[in-house]
Image: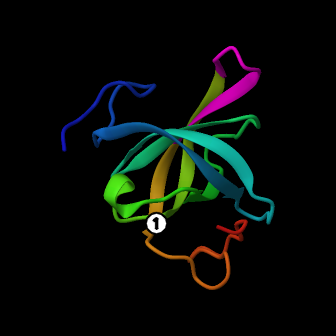
Amino acid sequence: MGRKTDAPGGCRAFTRQSFEMHVEYVVQGTNAPEKATLYNLGAGGMYFETRKPLSAATELSIRLVDYSPDVHGEYEFYRGRVAWSGQVDRGNGRRYGVGVRFLEKGAHAMGPGRTAAGARFSGR
């Protein structure tokens, strides 16, 4: 995969696949899943938009809500760190764009609604 330069700060190590889908994320140290919209996904990270601001370096567990291995690849669950975040204007209320760098990927939940990182997500 080649380098992309469409990330804030200049370079991205991996090409990302663009599509729009729902995700849930859980901030480390909490149990409340939040909803977001994913816009791109690659081997090293993802970009999603949410209604809540997130600080850089925040660790998250993320689940692709309508995951399909044929469309979205091998992994359904991710643990990552917020690389950057900022307000975006899509005309539908206040939204925050979030760039996430992956720390861990997982194909399946570990137990009822739990990821390998221990985050609890809502039912499928």
Q: What are the residue bounds of the magenta stretch?
A: 88-99
Q: Which residue is mark 1?
A: 104
State the colouring used for the structure image. Answer: rainbow
42 in the magenta segment: no
Instruction: From the viewer's perspective, tell me whether residue 56 is left or right of residue 68.
Output: right
Under tag 1, what secondary structure? Answer: strand
Task: Characterize the local packing of mark 1: few (<14), some (14-19) or many (20 or more) Cα atoms within 10 angstroms.
Answer: some
**Residue 99 against residue 59 in the figure, above or below:** above
The residue at 70%/58% (across/down) is: 26
Is 72 positioned to the left or the right of 47 in the image? Answer: left
Q: Quadrant of residue 37?
A: top right
Above or below residue 34? Residue 29 is: below
Q: Amino acid at mark 1?
A: Glu
The quarter of the displayed image where residue 28 is located: bottom right
In this image, 28 relative to 10: left or right?
A: right
Would residue 121 be found to the left or right of residue 105 on screen? right
Residue 23, image x and y in percent? 60, 50
Q: Which is the main secondary structure of the residues drawn in magenta?
A: strand
**Residue found 43% across the figure and 37% down from its top:** 19
The quadrant in which the C terminus is found is bottom right
In percent of width and height, residue 99 lies at 52, 38
Say which residue appears at 56% left-offset and 52% top-offset: 81
- Give residue 58's position: percent from left, percent from top: 65, 50
Question: Is residue 9 positioned above or below 26 on the image?
Answer: above
Q: Is residue 56 above or below residue 32?
A: above
